[in-house]
Amino acid sequence: MVGGGIDVTEHLEPIRAFLSERFELVSDVEELQRGGWSSAYSFRSGQHDLILRVGHHAEDFNKERYASTWRVAGVPVPDVLDLGEALDGFYIVSQRHEGQKLADLDPARVPRAIESLFEVLVAMREIRLPGRGFGIWRTPDCNAPATTWGEHLRSVGSRDETRLVGWRHRLAANPRASSAFKQGCAAVEELTIDLPETRGLVHADLLLNHLVDGNDGVTAVFDWGNALAGDPLYDIAWILYCIPWFQAIDRRHVLALARRRFPNDDIDRLLPLYELHIGVASLQYQAFAEDLASLETSAASISRLLLDIDGRRSP
């Protein structure tokens, strides 16, 4: 039994039937993960190991297919074999890459895995994203809605409820998180001046969505639905912000890698701002998901960041 008493065999029957209609010699169908926006299944078609994901947001999968066309050394995006509408939503089938998620690694392996992840970040800066604008880009033109990077960051407080249904009401019900959200939004509004207007590729969820092999190298980078057009330094802020949930990551190690690999970036000024923005956006998702523990963690992180930023500005 899994997830609220659902019988595994019964749950997988529609998946098996769908796959058997589209692929030959389907076997070994297994559920891998149920995520916030999609669920993933592994299966075999003949001698090929593949992944099926199903969800309700077609654009997430369209971006995944677009990312698979980059063919950039050092950014291993799985090949997409099929994509369309089915199973009461949308689906995508891609090549399976072997590896473990960072959360599943022995803590002793995490430092080397983070160093490998920085190799991916270096390679991502070679990708030239077409289109115009900043923020979440959409296929096929890769245009994004904000005219500047700062405008995108400042818009976080006015995020609509199209996908995160009910986040405002649920956040308001948590006084500490609601206060952190208001303070964080005000600080982001104040600090988003004189920002770099580099229109680079930002994954914006990289820490959770890559696989690591036995030698701690990155074997796959997937789930590009939240990818942004903006300052690539933002992805390093993601790593730092997530440390309370991934305590084997050493903040000092990440900062040392950032300074060594990207010496021209304004790391000391911009990383705290980007972490703060991520914290504010995280509160919205966590309120939507009713993840009370993470709301508390994010509220505490925002308070820490605000103190750190105020301390840097003090004479």
Image: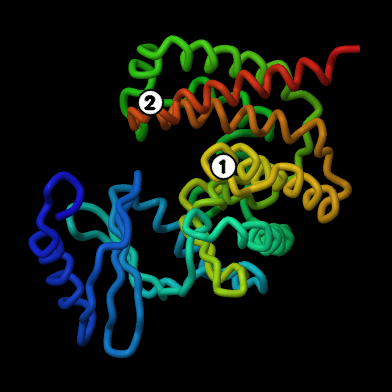
Q: Amino acid at mark 2?
A: Leu
Residue 272 horizontal side relative to residue 46, left or right: right
Above or below, comparing residue 274 to residue 137 in the picture: above
Residue behind mark 1: 144
Q: Is residue 29 above or below residue 205?
A: below
Comparing marks 2 and 1, which lies closer to the viewer?
Answer: 2
At x 40% / y 18%, what residue is drawn? 171
Instruction: Give the side of residue 173 with respect to residue 146, left or right.
Output: left
The C terminus is located in which quarter? Answer: top right
Please state which of residues 153 and 178 is positioned toward the viewer in this rendering. 178
Under mark 1, the amino acid is: Ala
Q: Is residue 109 left or right of residue 24?
A: right
Q: Position of residue 100 (x, y in %)?
A: 48, 65
Residue sitting farthest toward the right: 315
Q: Point out residue 206 in the picture as x, y percentages from the top left corner.
A: 56, 52
For the point 20% across and 87% down, the residue is 25
Q: Residues within 10 Å of mark 1 (few under 14, many from 20)?
A: many
Residue plotted at (69% across, 50% down): 200
Label 2: which residue? 292
Q: Secondary structure at mark 2?
A: helix
Name the residue nearer the viewer: 130 or 217: 217
For the view shown, which residue lies furthest in the bottom direction? 47
Q: Secondary structure at mark 1?
A: loop
Q: How is the image coloured?
A: rainbow
